[in-house]
Amino acid sequence: MVFSLWLGPLLLASAFLWAVAPPPPYQGCDFSHGRWVIDEASFHPLYHASRDCPFIGQGFDCLRNSRPDKDYLNYRWMPSTCHLPRFDGRNFLEKNTGKKIMFVGDSISNNMWQSLTCLLHVAVPNSNYTLTSQPQELFVFSFPEYRASIMWLKNGFLVDLVHDKEKGRILKLDSISSGDQWKEVDVLIFNTYHWWTHTGQSQAWDYFQVGNEFIKDMDHMEAFKIGLTTWAKWVDSNIDTSKTRVLFQGIAASHVDKKGCLRQTQPEEGSMASYPGVDIVKNVISKMAKPVQLLDITLLTQLRRDGHPSIYTGRGPSFDDCSHWCLPGVPDAWNEILYAALFGN
């Protein structure tokens, strides 16, 4: 990355100070606006996936899958108005001793969960861990020493998707029957968006249902709004936020467009057009009775066309993934923001 003559020394000095004494996080700071910069302090990448975290899924480990360029590993997210604190995995575990943290969402949620489990493991490499899969697509990464569990529950819509003999797959926009799995957890990080945008053969439903009405097709963003509102009402009615912290993992931009992500090697800069679904998420959360914190990651992902696995997923050059993210990489910044959100002063 090219810096101007006056900005380069300033960033180097800032990086030096950050290395000596990371500035404290700031409650209420807007981490959603900023830019990607090369980490001159050499903290990034925060781990080596294959060496440090062999449990990371093959599709996310782009180095192991022979990605030739390496610059994408060395960027950190720098907010415009404040500092993003350095992730401290040991502190994270100590503060969450005896607690359960659950990600609920699709494969983008899985991307963030795998990043977090690796960040924690490399912080306490001599602490034993267990990784198990349980019924109903629940994956549990546990640290017995800290009695802490970091879980991912696969659930792409949050609302119910059921199978009917006559109608096929029905996406019930006003129904949540699996919410009991979300209870008795200390931190909940929800995510849903990408499955709602699918069309054609990749679409996971045949009908929408609202009340007793079956709808063959409707605007997908309108369906998303109804479904997300159902989730919000469920949280308001069922979660005691004095005991459970609730966050919503914002919409991560995909780059499945004409330009794509193949052979992209640097972040973009500047402002970006508004991203579909973001206003719906913000509007629904703003109307909730219970406090839910949005991890607004949309802009920082819009700027990282280079951060996707592309053809380096281990599935061969015919498969081009511009939706998920390489690890190490962009999801590590999401967890740095999560760390600031949970422990900010």
Image (cartoon, rainbow, N blue to C red):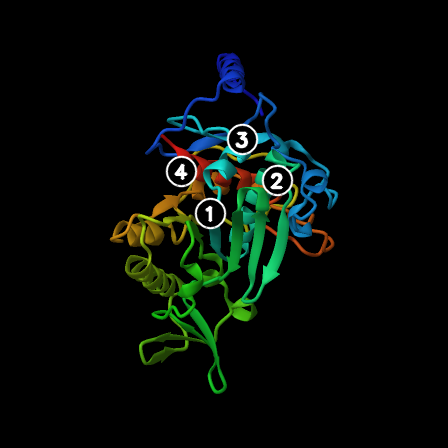
Distance, label 2 to label 1, CA atoms, is 16 Å
**Location of residue 170 by image quarter:** bottom left
Q: Label 3 crowding class (10 Å Cα cut-off): few <14, some 14-19, many 20+? A: many
- Mark 2 or mark 1: which is in front? 1
Distance, label 2 to label 3, CA atoms, is 20 Å
Q: Label 4 crowding class (10 Å Cα cut-off): few <14, some 14-19, many 20+? A: many
Q: Amino acid at mark 1?
A: Lys
Q: Residue at x 49, y 36 (%)?
A: 94
Q: Residue at x 30, y 54 (%)?
A: 284
* Tags 3 and 4 touching, CB below 8 Å: no
Q: Residue 121 bears which disc, if any?
A: 2
Q: How many marks?
A: 4
**Location of residue 201 by image quarter:** bottom right
Q: Secondary structure at mark 2?
A: helix
Q: Identify residue for label 1.
A: 99
175 to 317, vertically: above or below? below
Q: Is residue 108 visible?
A: no
- Mark 1 or mark 4: which is in front? 1
- Mark 1 or mark 3: which is in front? 1
142 to 87, vertically: above or below? below
Location of residue 140 in the rendering, given as x and y in whole percent from the top left corner: 57, 54
Mark 4 and mark 2 lie on one chain; the one further toward the N terminus is 2
Q: Identify residue for label 3.
A: 76
Mark 3 and mark 4 lie on one chain; the one further toward the N terminus is 3
Q: Residue at x 24, y 53 (%)?
A: 289
